[in-house]
Image (cartoon, helix red, strand yellow):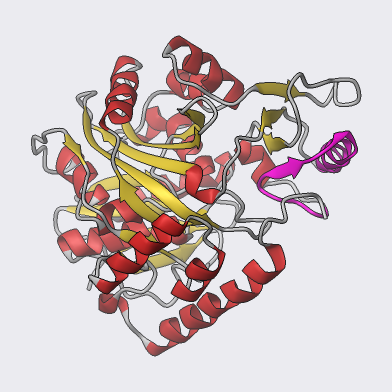
Amino acid sequence: MTVGNETFVPVLLGSDMNAYGMARSFHEAYGIKSLVLGRAALSATANSKILTLREIPNLNTQEVFLPTVLKIAEEFKGRKLLLLACGDDYAKLIINNKPELTPHFAVPYMGRELMERLVLKENFYEICEQYEFAYPKTTLCTFDNKDTFTIDFEYPIIIKASNSVAYWNCSFPGKKKVFVAHDEAEKKAIIDAIYQSSYKDNLTIQEFIPGDDSYMRVLNAYVGKDGEVKLMSLGNPILEEHSPEGIGSYAAIINTFDEALLDKVRHFLEDIEYIGFANFDMKWDERDREYKLFEINLRNGRSSYYVSASGHNLMKYVTDDYIYDKPMELTYAKDKHLWLIIPKGVLFKYAQNVQLKREAKRLIDEGKWTNSLFYSEDFNIIRWIKLKLNNLNYYRKYKKYFNQKGLS
């Protein structure tokens, strides 16, 4: 099987689980291989027959990114190229280089001005105020005021980087994607550790919204090139990952539905003239019975294959829009399906929501479940063994890290 088909080639930037889910969606819709460009070979995309992986060191830097993708455009001249980001850094690079890329690629992304309004969390919360979205009580810590700033809400608190791209590139002992501090001393220790690394941008400090992982919601949307929303799908995570690098990433999701929420987000996306994929993270707050928005990602989410698994192939939406110019009606996904990347034994041991565990068991019994990394059309013994070993490793990870969100 050659890369793409005679009409188009999907070019995916990033080699993680999101890239594999996207490649699987393209293969399921069109029977084609995607071209995956990444800085390193990761287990999710290794030993796969449904994609061609090219390792390109420092691909997430401007100096390497633009020459590389323009070289790809020359290599596949004569075929339509659909350029998609699997991570925040690549989405930012695509948007910053959009004028140079659009002569050669279909680029389903907004312009730089809107990106700059959305990409930093403090800017996003200003927009939340404008569109009457609730969000957690929030303040900013800067490198300059880190020793003197105070908070006006109670512990525990969340500490996370405002600039996710810069934070991804820093390193320090005890690094986690998100921290929870329970008192002033823990807050200071975490902030000091972060700022002793190369990261010097702002930190977002938030109140902790009560509730376990099942109080989270994830919303993936696709907005067409005409500026109208075409697809929205709301997921209810049952369990998140709890390893230091995975905190806040979803490990198991069941599709759910809330028409009023989808209507509100759709109006927001269309009003700000958004284009392409959008991914929202939020948490249900029982105290005032409102969803509290955390952020918007300018791409489909890492766990977004849950949308395709439920019968609404995300990659078909963007392809029909940009490659085949097919008209699409608005769809709110409603079909129930269980998506997971962990063993079922881990899910049922560590998930805390009894009702959702019952629903997960029912969906499994009905055959309505998917692990996006295990794809029958992409079977080979090496990949299968490595994925099985990685799957078993989740038992160790959860035993060691479950609910450990401090610095140690």
Spot occupied by residue 189 in the image (x, y as percentages of width and height): 88, 41
Note whether residue 348 is visible.
Answer: yes
- State the extent of the magenta-drawn residues as a range: 173-197
| Relative height, residue 261 to residue 20 (above, below) | above
Q: Extreme bottom residue here?
A: 381
The answer to if 187 sits in the magenta stretch is: yes
| Relative height, residue 379 to residue 27 (above, below) | below
| Relative height, residue 310 to residue 215 (above, below) | below
Judged left or right of residue 63, residue 301 is left
Query: What residue sits 52% from the left and 32% below the top?
Result: 285
Residue in front for this viewpoint, 191 or 110? 191
Note whether residue 11 is visible.
Answer: no
Judged left or right of residue 7, residue 190 is right
Spot occupied by residue 235 in the image (x, y as percentages of width and height): 36, 46
Spot occupied by residue 354 in the image (x, y as percentages of width and height): 46, 58
The answer to if 231 sits in the magenta stretch is: no
Residue in front for this viewpoint, 200 or 213? 213
Give the quadrant of the N terminus.
bottom left
Give the quadrant of the C terminus.
bottom right
| Relative height, residue 125 to residue 406 (above, below) | above
Total number of numbered discs in the rendering: 0
Query: What residue sits 45% from the left and 20% below the top?
Result: 133
Query: Quadrant location of residue 274?
Result: top left
Query: What residue sits 76% from the left and 38% below the top?
Result: 199
Judged left or right of residue 30, residue 380 is right
Query: Quadrant location of residue 324?
Result: top left
Judged left or right of residue 225, residue 144 is right
Spot occupied by residue 184 in the image (x, y as percentages of width and height): 87, 33
Q: Extreme left residue here?
A: 327
Query: What residue sits 40% from the left and 56% below the top?
Result: 356
Residue in front for this viewpoint, 231 or 361? 361
Q: Extreme top residue here?
A: 130
